[in-house]
Image: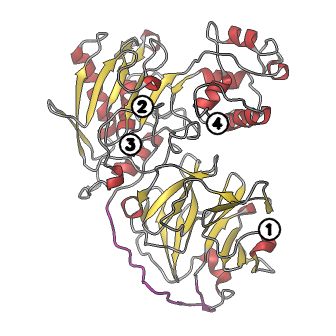
Amino acid sequence: MQTHISILCICLMSGFIPLKTSQVNGNENGVNGNENGTNGIDTFLGNFHFSADNFLEKFGYMEMPKSEGNISHSAESRERAVRLFQEYYGLTVSGIMDKNTIVQMKRPRCGVPDMGKGSPNGPAPFTAPGYKWNKNIISWKTTRYSRKLPSSTQRFAFENSFKKWSDVTPLKFEYTNGDPDIEIYFARGNHGDGVGNSFDGPGRVLAHAYYPTDGGTHFDEDEKWVFGGNANDGIDLEVVAAHEFGHALGLGHSNNPDSLMYPAYRFQSQGWKLHYDDIVGIQSLYGSPSETSTPPMTVPSVRQTPRRRPTTQSMTTHRSVTRTTQITSNFPDTTIKPNLPGGTCNLTFDAITLGLNGNTYAFRNMEVYKLGNAGMAPGYPKKSYDVFPKAPQNPSAAFHALNHVYIIKGRRLWRYTNFKLDDQYPKEVRNMPSRQRINFAFTYKNHWGDEQIYLFGDTHFWEFNKYTDDVLPRYKLPISSYWTGVPNSPDAGIQWTDNYIYLFKGSKYIKMDPRKRRVIAGYPKDIAPSWIRGVCNSVPK
């Protein structure tokens, strides 16, 4: 498992924007310029030359070169990348490099890829679980202070920053003279974190931090660091430190611009507080101050990596989840057929997923069942391949994301748009686990509205990258550590329209709170959830 890092930075890179004349047409939404767009962009960005391709590669919207040298991108791939960027930041989605798009690209921001796909060593989507401290007392130490402020002022700023997090969690932060959990220092240029993570002088890269269990937090000495004051005085050390400490505690970025964990730096007035997003994120990791802390468990061996520095580009994991307390499931080892009003129900499905118009599709053997608010749709069940052409029988998993329905069997992936099999599918899924079968998958929609797809095996789970159609490399985590109460080898799972997660095994099911990642009291149950009862009498016993 490699070390991960996040950088809060201004990214203005050398080069030119390779755009067609139609994309820089000089209208109110465009940027004036010649055929390559260089004149208008030079005017717009001042003295900085800006490469849109480099930007889109760096932040995961287009493929990065696998070796030194440039990579040739088609007009279609470039337009798709711009559309993804615009969608991610809530801009008008046009696929054209208009003024608002360039303004957003120019803003001070984190150096971590947005899409987690720009590099084969890149991070997962920012809310993926896996990184937290398994203790509530965390030590810190500053080993090299800045010359821009008195050391006592810097220490006070750091204490204030830590307090933002300790006020809303059971965490306590203690200064130490020994080996700290979080080591803080100021540096210039290449400071041992790899060339790609070098600081670059005033006004660009501000700081970066490593995720648990490293926690190293570094600040660019060339910045004009201030404590308090006004927005024009310089970069507020307390605000940047609080952001970086969020990473050092295991948080990724929020796409809410009011959140402290938003990628871009934003000055905060005196007395500022954490945003709701920040509080929900950190409490999903460590709980609230009033919660009784659970005994820490040993970090899984896959997470036990030595303290080291990255040798490639900056990296991060993302907003982690829940406690790591293992709870034994009450699921039986054999299938029980409970008696329901109207008959017996066997809930053994191969896969369940949402689809178009809020309907639910449950796969079993060679058939698919369509469920809606009124129960099972007329004419169902049907053969799976009559609804989803060329669909496999007994699929391993199914899920819905980006307006597509995905079906997995073994290492192969089928993708459907409006019930039509997309071109180039089915295809092999890269990095698919080879020693564990996939039992189920579901799309988890977090409280920012971002969709994450989790694939569950017998004892471990993985995250699927919906933009690249592969499993995130080196992402393998024990189910018992991060999903409290989930049984081994469930049959199917889904996050339904009520936002709760339902997992099925045999004739029982559990209902999970997606924010706390734990089973709701009173589960597992024999009685089928109301939205699936319409299929109960149609499933062969």
Which of the 4 quarters of the picture holds residue 78?
Answer: top right
Mark 1 or 2: the one toward you: 2
- Residue 341 magenta-highlighted: yes
Q: Earlier in the sequence, mark 1 or mark 2?
A: 2
| Tag 1 near tag 3, CB within 8 Å | no
**N-terminal-most mark, 3 or 2:** 3
Task: Find disc 1 in the rendering and name its residue.
Answer: 389
Q: CA distance from mark 1 to mark 2?
A: 45 Å
Q: Nearer the viewer, residue 79 or 341?
A: 79
Q: Name the amino acid type tagged 3.
A: Gly
Tell whether position 253 is magenta: no
Residue 23 showing in the rendered view: yes
What whole-number distance in Å separates the C-alpha atoms at marks 1 and 4?
A: 30 Å
Residue located beneath label 4 in the image: 63
What residue span does the magenta drawing correspond to?
A: 325-346
The answer to the question of whether label 3 and label 4 lie on touching residues, with beta carbons closer than 8 A, is no
The reply to whether discs 3 and 2 touch (Cβ–Cβ < 8 Å) is no
CA separation, marks 4 and 2? 20 Å
